[in-house]
């Protein structure tokens, strides 16, 4: 199996760093091929605009989807983006490794998605969910959160679970582009753990990683159930997604 890990934490000695090192050693020892993009170490630029392209469709007005679709047809992405797109195309399983910040993705990882999951490459022309570009691939979020599990519930201070916080990622990004989404691996309050507890959590993570190929995926919608639904979008592009997408 080919696994692509996108790592988004600025500190190499963090628990996120330990999780990625555990993933690489565990998976390679089991005979899998592993590639890691360490976004902070790479100095990845999260800003998505004309810097994405070596091609230009409209030099006067930037319409991001239109430029992405145009670049997709002409191999018009800058080399650093094309390299990441190639890794996504190469992998069987994508692992997003990140800390949950402000109930969402770190900006650098959100920017990676904005730039890499481009119209024409990751979606478009009706290619979504079970008809998506990445059907047959799997994806999993591996996440650390600052608080204990009890605070992430309807009755906790955040008023919602980690799973509900991850819904926009699971459904609106990964499932939308066709990935079979695995249950996330969530570590609560690693900074408050003892060294022994951290080691036990890493061992548990290693066991989870060895099941990536066979673990059941979360339920996702079937486009056949929505054949009569007209997605009202102002965009005339054949690559347009849901109405709220990328405006």
Image (cartoon, rainbow, N blue to C red):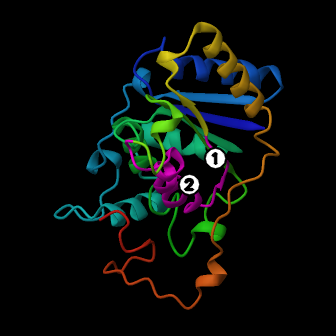
Q: Which residue is mark 2?
A: 174
Task: For the residues labelled 1 and 2, say whether their Cβ atoms are less than 8 Å apart.
Answer: yes
Residue at 58% x, 28% y is: 36
Residue at 61% x, 62% y is: 133
Identify the residue at the far front of this view: 155
Q: Confirm whether residue 103 shows in the render.
A: yes
Residue 139: which disc?
1
SS at mark 1? strand
User: Tag 1: Cα neighbours inside 10 Å, few (<14), some, or many (≥20)?
Assistant: many
x%, y% of residue 3? Answer: 69, 36
x%, y% of residue 177? Answer: 56, 60
Marks 1/2: CA–CA distance:
7 Å
Q: Write down the region rendered in magenta.
A: 157-184
User: Tag 2: Cα neighbours inside 10 Å, few (<14), some, or many (≥20)?
Assistant: many
Q: Confirm whether residue 117 shows in the render.
A: no
Residue 174 colored magenta?
yes
Against 177, residue 96 (above or below) is: above
């Amino acid at each position: 199996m080919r696994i692509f890990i996108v790592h988004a934490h600025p500190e190499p000695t963090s628990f996120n760093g330990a999780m990625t090192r555990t993933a690489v050693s565990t998976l390679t020892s089991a005979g899998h091929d592993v590639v890691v993009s360490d976004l902070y170490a790479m100095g990845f630029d999260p800003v998505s605009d004309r810097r994405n392209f070596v091609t230009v469709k409209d030099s006067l007005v930037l319409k991001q989807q239109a430029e992405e679709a145009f670049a997709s047809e002409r191999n018009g992405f800058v080399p650093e983006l094309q390299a990441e797109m190639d890794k996504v195309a190469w992998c069987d399983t994508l692992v997003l490794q990140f800390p949950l910040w402000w109930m969402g993705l770190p900006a650098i990882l959100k920017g990676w998605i904005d730039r890499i999951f481009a119209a024409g490459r990751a979606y478009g022309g009706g290619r979504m969910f079970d008809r998506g570009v990445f059907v047959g691939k799997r994806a999993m979020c591996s996440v650390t959160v600052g608080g204990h599990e009890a605070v992430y519930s309807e009755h906790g201070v955040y008023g919602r679970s980690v799973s509900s916080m991850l819904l926009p990622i699971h459904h609106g990004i990964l499932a939308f582009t066709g990935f079979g989404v695995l249950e996330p691996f969530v570590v609560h309050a690693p900074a408050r753990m003892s060294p022994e507890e951290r080691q036990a959590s890493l061992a548990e993570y290693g066991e989870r990683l060895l099941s990536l190929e066979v673990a059941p995926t979360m339920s996702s919608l079937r486009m056949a159930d929505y054949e009569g639904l007209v997605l009202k979008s102002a965009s005339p592009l054949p690559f347009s997604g849901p109405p709220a997408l990328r405006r």
